[in-house]
Image (spheres, helix red, strand yellow):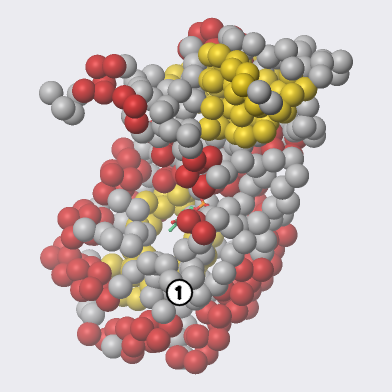
Amino acid sequence: MEEKNLGVIFEGFFSYRKGSLHVEDTGMQELAMAHDTPSYIYSRNYLLSQVSRIKSAFEQVDTMICYSVKANSNLELLKIMRKEELGADVVSGGELRGALIAGFPPGKIVFAGVGKKDEEIEFGVSRDIYCFNVENEEELSSLEKYGRKYGRKVICNLRLNLDIDLDTHHYVKTSRKETKFGIDTVKAEEIIGHSGRYKYASIEGFHLHLGSQIKEVEPYLKAMEKVEEFNRKIKFNPRIIDLGGGFGIPYSVRDKVIDISDFGKSISSIVKSMGIEKLILEPGRFIVGNTAVLLTRVLYVKRRGEKTFLIVDAAMNDLIRPALYGSHHTILPVAEPSAATPSIKADVVGPVCETGDYLGKDISVPADIKKGDLLVAANAGAYSFSMSSNYNSRPRPCEILVDGKDSEIIRKRETYEDLWKAKI
Ligand SMILES: Cc1ncc(COP(=O)(O)O)c(C=O)c1O
């Protein structure tokens, strides 16, 4: 098998025991028998360990860690984050409602998003959420309007577009000037210059979210440097910096990513030297990304010439990242291959009628793999279930949360009836 040293991805929470893949103390085989496939399987303790890693990395400054709900909005997972005293970063009225249902205190909710509707802004203001990350001047006028209506100050952070490039997929770079996100510094200076016209919308800081799956610290350091320069130029002292999220995770055992503890130290010392009162972070992928796998079963092994296709029961509607971004997911058999078993290369594909419907290409699998065998696509906690759909009228998988030897369904498998609910 290609993938050795799985600890880089799984940190010991998923491992082979007695020849079969386990999540914590629970066998995947048993989970497949109990819940069928495809199923998303989460490790509760891995999730908690990621939360505690990021908390301790930033404990030197006043940091509000707001879990980015878009990464995975499962209500039970949100409740875990809330119990861990995280806040929530939301980008829509739906996410805001989800965060409130999960019990996040409004004072720990931050609202970003390039196209907030007036009704979403009003809902956020009426619930007295902590702040809005503002994307343009008209949005400030709406915030002023609803601040006046509800008689409350609305904290606003201007989302800056600092034209910073990243080594990540171009769909998730959000800080280049050609993207739709943020306000450039010329416009930001103008807005701050006439901020006196707002009585309720109070500009107190900047939002800097750069993009996603960022594997180096340099872009963050560069962003902070640019903000410092900008503050000096316009003589503005932001009280808040919301650095956004984007902290990368290893998708394969070869991936090098940010060391969160060193990263926390460098950012904290800059925050202190800039006299910032409050740092906000919006991690999504870092917290959930590697804490789940998509468990799937081989339906057919199709051999044609040189090529082998494993046709599995999970598809692009369940996990769209490979089709959308060409993303790599580590794919492993549930039955541990013996050292003596030769491996072959195969494309792991779903039943959807699109050539782009694949989970992995040229994946090393045991040569004797056959119909009925189980596989997992790892790295499936973030932007996986939350981006799933019913394409090809396929009901979406269930989600199972494992805690040691225990497991619970945290979202039921959709039924065929569910598919038509909104239509009849
Ligand atoms: C504004 C904002 N904050 C936070 C995030 C979370 O990013 P990640 O999951 O990479 O940490 C995103 C994701 O795109 C975002 O748009």
102 left or right of 335?
left
Identity of the residue furthest to the front in this view: 305
Residue 204 sits above or below residue 72 on the image: below
Position of 244 compared to 6: left or right? left
Q: Is residue 386 above or below residue 147?
A: above
**Residue at 22% in and 55% down:** 120
For the point 61% across and 41% down, the residue is: 328
Question: Is 405 or 114 nearer to us in this picture?
Answer: 114
| Residue 302 screen position, x and y as percent | 59, 17
Quadrant position of the C terminus in the picture = top left
Which sits in the foreground, 144 or 208?
208
Q: Is mark 1 within 8 Å of ligand 1?
A: no
Q: Residue furthest right?
A: 340
Q: Secondary structure at mark 1?
A: loop
- Which residue is painted at 61% across and 52% down in the image? 248
Quadrant position of residue 113: bottom left
Q: Residue at x 54, y 27 (%)?
A: 349
Number of numbered callouts drawn: 1
The answer to whether residue 19 of the structure is visible from this angle is yes
Name the quadrant of the N terminus: top right
Q: Position of residue 271 (x, y in %)?
A: 59, 72
Circle 1 residue:
177
Q: Position of residue 134 (x, y in %)?
A: 34, 68
User: In the picture provided, is 54 more to the left or to the right than 97?
Assistant: right
Question: Quick check: can you spot residue 24?
Answer: no
Q: Name the amino acid type tagged 1.
A: Lys
Front residue of 263 and 248: 248
Characterize the local packing of mark 1: few (<14), some (14-19) or many (20 or more) Cα atoms within 10 angstroms.
some
Residue 324 percent across, percent down from the top left: 47, 44
